[in-house]
Amino acid sequence: MGAMRASNPDPDPDSTPGLERGGGVPPGETPPAEGSTSEAGPRHAAPKGWATGPLIAIGIVVVLVAGFFLAYAVLLIT
């Protein structure tokens, strides 16, 4: 397995025109473009969909609310 090498995507301040010593940009100059961020972000796919726990909890709440209204309706009829 080969080792991954991280390259610096920023421009080299020594060879970039329009930069002052130390990498600063003088007034009136346009700063150099940033490097690509193609390597940024998660390295795995994010999970999709709902987890089982929240779905069960929502189902229990729905059944309890429906049962309450059903019991209330039965008590009104009698």
Image: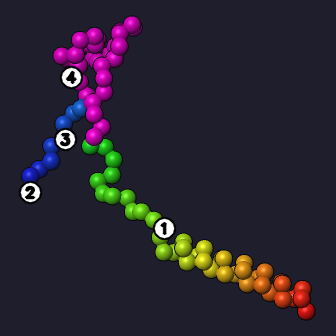
- The color scheme shown is rainbow
Residue situated furthest front in the rendering: 77
Residue underneath mark 1: 50
Q: Point out the tag, 1 or 4, that comes first from the N-terminus.
A: 4
Numbered tag placed on residue 6 in the rendering:
3
Query: Are discs 2 and 1 less than 8 Å apart at CB?
Result: no
Judged left or right of residue 2, residue 36 is right
Please name the residue that numbered disc 2 is placed on. Answer: 1
Q: Circles 1 and 4: CB distance less than 8 Å? A: no
Q: CA distance from mark 1 to mark 4?
A: 46 Å
Task: Give the magenta-colored segment's residue range.
Answer: 10-38
- Of labels 2 and 4, earlier in sequence is 2
Determine crowd level at label 1: few under 14, some 14-19, many 20+ residues with C-alpha closer than 10 A: few
Residue 28 horizontal/vertical position (percent):
39, 7
State left or right for residue 72 relative to residue 42. Answer: right
Q: Amino acid at mark 1?
A: Trp
- Quarter of the image for the N terminus: give it: bottom left
Specify which label sits upstream in the sequence, 4 or 3: 3
Q: Is residue 57 above or below residue 31?
A: below
